[in-house]
């Protein structure tokens, strides 16, 4: 049996604001260790027997994050499926199942579906659980992984274990039922009973088993994804489903769409549909759904603090203190969460961090840009950062990766001045093509076709001064682009 991993790398990351933003969510950051959470997810597959390269499902805005970050750790994905808009995990898994069935020369692959933004401290234990679930999935079961709880957690859903399926010390079990996030007293009773596991959101099943169950319980999702897949297009490693078809698809999680309904069927009602099993997972798992998770899993100092970045702590205890750009000095705080970024600072009590999502909603409704993006914005060719702005002008610092190029483009409402501060640039301006070295500059008038390229093997740094009546990012007319953008 060959296992086909599907990494679901969507999600907006609002609970880890201000580090995680809608345009740069947590799976693309090194939240806990030096590697990003997407990279950690791909790496924990190392050592599994008969495993294929991962297939990744992500938002269109993040496809180059996925490609670049996996390339950086030497992982070439089997493919990348691009969602035009997020529709939760059930449509994501459905697109992956349809893609794998079409690409698989008639065989029915066993899929390991896992979020790209979870923490697993014990990768060996994770792989052991996957091996245990693989035989069940190969036999047609819908398999979920239930985390062995070490506390009465109210932020997770729970899976209730039914009859054991073998006589091992921690056997896979039939699923008796799924339950929603409980209150504290109920969570305590669940943990004390030993009958409940946290719902990890990690699943295994044959592609055909998933599609059959989805057709039974959510035929609307099955039909919309089927149409989107049929009308999709392949562009290199990127597969884009039919946009208009996919946008008609309801958003739903794997749990709600299928797993909970399938687990609640009687034998008579099941009528040949796959049964549902849960495999215990005791591997230091967390969904890193709030800043408090870093306090739980991060390395603490002698005062119980988790400290990252340029931080001075004095008489501070049991706090998370994170600096991204500036010195953070914390004096006399306890049970606090302080996260500093270039354009926003979060200060919260550690017991209130679940409310960060609500705060981000307020920022978004007020039109605050800090809800969506960092001051430094990543592009497939590199990145840019707004240094200063005012009426009629904006100053950016552009970083162009070696060998990369911006699109051949023009602006209707602004002119641009470029100053090279590091590296060497190749510039197209109208019919001219010329080079710029450090301390040299040029002017691009409004309406002129232009392009900036880095022909060298070191990053190109450029200060760009924009002037004009309108300076929005949507004032771009592209004529040619190496990354398929329009």
Image: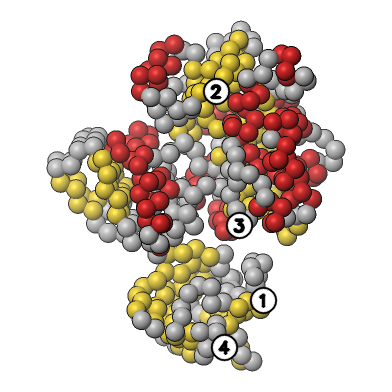
Which residue lies under the disc numbered 1? 480
Mark closest to the chain's N terminus, 3 or 4: 3
Mark closest to the chain's N terminus, 1 or 4: 4
Label 4 environment density (alpha carbons within 10 Å; few <14, some 14–19, many ≥20): some
Query: Looking at the image, do the residues carrying marks 4 and 2 touch, with CB atoms under 8 Å apart?
Result: no
Which residue lies under the disc numbered 3? 60
Element assignment for label 2: strand
273 to the left or right of 341: right
Placement of the C terminus among the 4 image quadrants: bottom right
Cα separation, mark 1 vs mark 4, equals 16 Å
Does residue 399 appear in this view? yes
What residue is rendered at 49% in x and 57% in y?
23
Mark closest to the chain's N terminus, 2 or 3: 3
Query: Looking at the image, do the residues carrying marks 2 and 3 touch, with CB atoms under 8 Å apart?
Result: no
Query: Looking at the image, do the residues carrying marks 3 and 1 touch, with CB atoms under 8 Å apart?
Result: no
Estimate the x, y position of residue 274 in percent, counting from the top left. Answer: 72, 23
Cα separation, mark 3 vs mark 1, equals 19 Å
Estimate the x, y position of residue 290 in percent, counting from the top left. Answer: 39, 40
Does residue 124 appear in this view? no
Which residue lies under the disc numbered 2? 178
Query: Looking at the image, do the residues carrying marks 3 and 4 touch, with CB atoms under 8 Å apart?
Result: no
Which residue lies under the disc numbered 4? 447
Element assignment for label 4: loop
């Amino acid at each position: 049996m060959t296992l086909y991993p599907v990494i679901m790398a969507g999600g907006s990351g609002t609970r880890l604001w201000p580090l995680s933003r809608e345009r740069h969510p947590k799976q693309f950051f090194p939240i806990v260790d030096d590697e990003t959470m997407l990279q950690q997810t791909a790496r924990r597959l190392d050592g599994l027997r008969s495993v294929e390269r991962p297939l990744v499902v992500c938002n269109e805005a993040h496809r180059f994050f996925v490609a670049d970050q996996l390339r950086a750790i030497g992982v070439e994905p089997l493919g990348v499926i691009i969602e035009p808009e997020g529709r939760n995990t059930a449509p994501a898994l459905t697109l992956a199942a349809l893609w794998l069935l079409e690409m698989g020369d008639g065989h029915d692959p066993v899929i390991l579906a896992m979020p790209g933004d979870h923490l697993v401290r014990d990768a060996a234990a994770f792989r052991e659980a996957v091996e245990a679930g693989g035989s069940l999935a190969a036999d047609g079961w819908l398999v979920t992984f239930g985390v062995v709880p070490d506390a009465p957690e109210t932020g997770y859903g729970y899976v209730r274990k039914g009859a054991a399926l073998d006589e091992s010390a921690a056997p896979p079990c039939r699923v008796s039922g799924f339950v929603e996030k409980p209150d504290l007293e109920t969570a305590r009773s669940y943990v004390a009973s030993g009958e409940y596991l946290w719902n990890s959101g990690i699943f295994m099943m044959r592609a055909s088993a998933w599609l059959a169950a989805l057709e039974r319980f959510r035929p609307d999702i099955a039909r919309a994804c089927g149409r989107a897949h049929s009308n999709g297009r392949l562009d290199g490693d990127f597969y884009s489903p039919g946009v208009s078809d996919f946008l008609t698809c309801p958003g739903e999680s794997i749990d709600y769409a299928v797993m909970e309904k399938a687990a609640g069927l009687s034998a008579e009602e099941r009528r040949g549909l796959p049964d549902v099993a849960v495999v215990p997972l005791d591997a230091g798992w967390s969904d890193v759904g709030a800043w408090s998770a870093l306090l739980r899993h991060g390395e603490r100092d002698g005062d119980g603090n988790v400290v990252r970045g340029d931080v001075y702590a004095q008489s501070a205890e049991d706090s998370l203190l994170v600096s991204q750009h500036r010195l953070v000095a914390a004096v006399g705080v306890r049970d606090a969460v302080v996260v500093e970024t270039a354009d926003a600072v979060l200060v919260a009590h550690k017991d209130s961090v679940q409310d960060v999502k609500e705060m981000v909603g307020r920022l978004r409704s007020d039109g605050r840009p800090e809800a969506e993006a960092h001051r430094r914005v990543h592009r497939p060719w590199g990145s840019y950062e707004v240094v200063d702005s005012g009426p009629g002008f904006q100053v950016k610092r552009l970083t162009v990766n070696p060998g990369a190029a911006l699109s051949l483009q023009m602006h209707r409402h602004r002119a641009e001045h470029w100053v090279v501060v590091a590296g060497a640039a190749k510039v197209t301006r109208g019919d001219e093509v010329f080079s710029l070295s450090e301390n040299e500059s040029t002017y691009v008038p409004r309406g002129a076709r232009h392009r900036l390229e880095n022909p060298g093997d070191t990053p190109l740094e450029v200060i760009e001064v924009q002037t004009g009546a309108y300076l929005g990012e949507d004032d771009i007319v592209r004529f040619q682009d190496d990354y398929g953008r329009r």
